[in-house]
Image: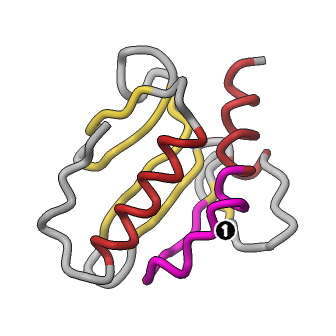
Amino acid sequence: MTVNLAALDDPLRETADQLCAVIESALPEATGAMWHGHPVWGLGERPGAQPICLLKPYASYLTFGLWRGQDVPDPSGRLVPGARRMASVKLRAAADVDPELFTGWLRRAYELETR
């Protein structure tokens, strides 16, 4: 999915571009769509039916969230628990995106949805 992030100012646009590339590389099986005003990636054709992750922009940071993030091992301690089983991390710069770490989170989140 190509997410229109042109309205974001740098460094958030650069951060979002890098994060989207990691998501799309880690989850080639996922479908991306706009859902409730922000991009989500999940399984199936209906956004939100089986969501895996989301990207939500704010004025000074981006939130990268995993719907079942509290069930994903996080030795880095960066994922912050949220509502239900969600967990997220705030990103302020492209350097905050660790491709290896995020790919691990995404693959584990995918496995949780497919077993």
Q: Nearer the viewer, residue 60 or 6?
A: 6
Picture residue at 26% right of the left edge, 42% below the top: 2
Picture residue at 45% right of the left edge, 21% below the top: 49
Location of residue 98 in the rendering, given as x and y in whole percent from the top left corner: 63, 69
Give the extent of the magenta segment: 88-103
Location of residue 91 in the rendering, given as x and y in whole percent from the top left corner: 48, 76
Location of residue 96 in the rendering, given as x and y in whole percent from the top left corner: 55, 78
Picture residue at 78% right of the left edge, 48% below the top: 72
The answer to whether 92 is drawn above or below residue 65 in the figure is below
Residue at mark 1: 80
- Image quadrant where one finds the N terminus: top left
Q: Amino acid at mark 1?
A: Val
Location of residue 52 in the rendering, given as x and y in whole percent from the top left corner: 56, 37
User: Quarter of the image holding residue 111?
Assistant: top right
User: Quarter of the image holding residue 75?
Assistant: bottom right
Name the outermost residue toward the left: 7
- Image quadrant where one finds the C terminus: top right
